[in-house]
Amino acid sequence: MVIIEKVRRDAPWAWLKAGLADLAAEPGISLGYGAVFTIVGIAITLGLTALGYGGLAPVFVAGFALVAPAFAIGVYRISQVRDAGGKPRLFDFWSMAVGRVTQLALLSVLLLVFFLAWARLAQFLFAMFAYGSDMTLTSVLPFLFTPQCLGLIVVGSLIGGALALGAFAISAISFPMLVDQDVDAFTAIAASVKAVKAQPAVMLTWAWLIAVITLLGSVTFLIGLAFTFPLIAHASWRAYKDFAPRPVSSREALAAERA
């Protein structure tokens, strides 16, 4: 069982402010992680284009955001070390216990499943709505001005939104919790899902802010992600600290609910 604290309704804005302070305190390391994330996104785009699937690049990059929390472990460690009064270093994540790394890897694989599901569904939807077109940029550009494209956007957004919401629910605070506490992945997932269920308005606002900030970082040919990625990661750490999840026995959890 896991219990969490109740947060203010305007907490997401406070998380962003605190995350920006973390980033400003350690800009070199934070932006370094952001640059790596950006390079991976650009590599995906260039690779798809080289293989003749350039038309799907935006879809795959959007799906890549589903696994972003797994790439943010180093950024979480920056905030963790700062909270402990230490001086963050570039490879602090290597100092984590093996058990925590194993649980983080397990949770990362789960997010990878979401990403692969989105990639496969995107291919299927494109084939269904853009029948007769290939996935190159030259073929996709004319398709953007057809009625079928609107249908693809609507259906794709609904399906992608459902997958994104599922990924968000299990990862909103679970990765920071695994970095900070000696718990298993399923306990961390339970804490994250409980936070979403307990305060859906707050967490949906946070999910919306993440989506908007990520979009702003992506429209600048992904360059902006070098800043927005560590900002969101630092802010997610602050969200975790605000909810302060902690595993307890069933009796303790029942007593806390009655209080």
Image (cartoon, rainbow, N blue to C red):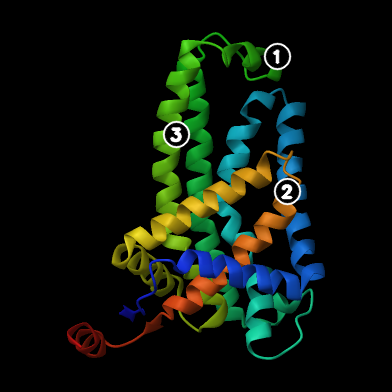
Residue picked out by circle 3: 157
Q: Which of 31 and 254 is in front in this view?
A: 31
Kindly report which numbered mark, 2 or 3, lies closer to the viewer in this rendering: 2
- Are circles 2 and 3 on residues that touch, CB within 8 Å? no
Q: Nearer the viewer, residue 48 or 156?
A: 156
Q: Residue furthest top?
A: 132
Residue picked out by circle 1: 138
The amino acid marked with disc number 3 is Ser
Q: Residue visible at 72% across and 36% down?
A: 45
Q: In which quarter of the image is residue 61?
A: top right
User: What's the CA distance linking mark 2 and mark 1?
Assistant: 26 Å
Q: Residue visible at 58% across and 16% down?
A: 144
| Of pointers 2 and 3, the one earlier in the residue sequence | 3
Q: Classify 10 Å Cα crowding around label 2: few (below 14), some (14-19), many (20 and above).
A: some
Q: Classify 10 Å Cα crowding around label 1: few (below 14), some (14-19), many (20 and above).
A: few
Q: Where is residue 105 in the image (x, y as percent from the top left)?
A: 57, 65
Q: Quadrant of residue 23?
A: bottom right
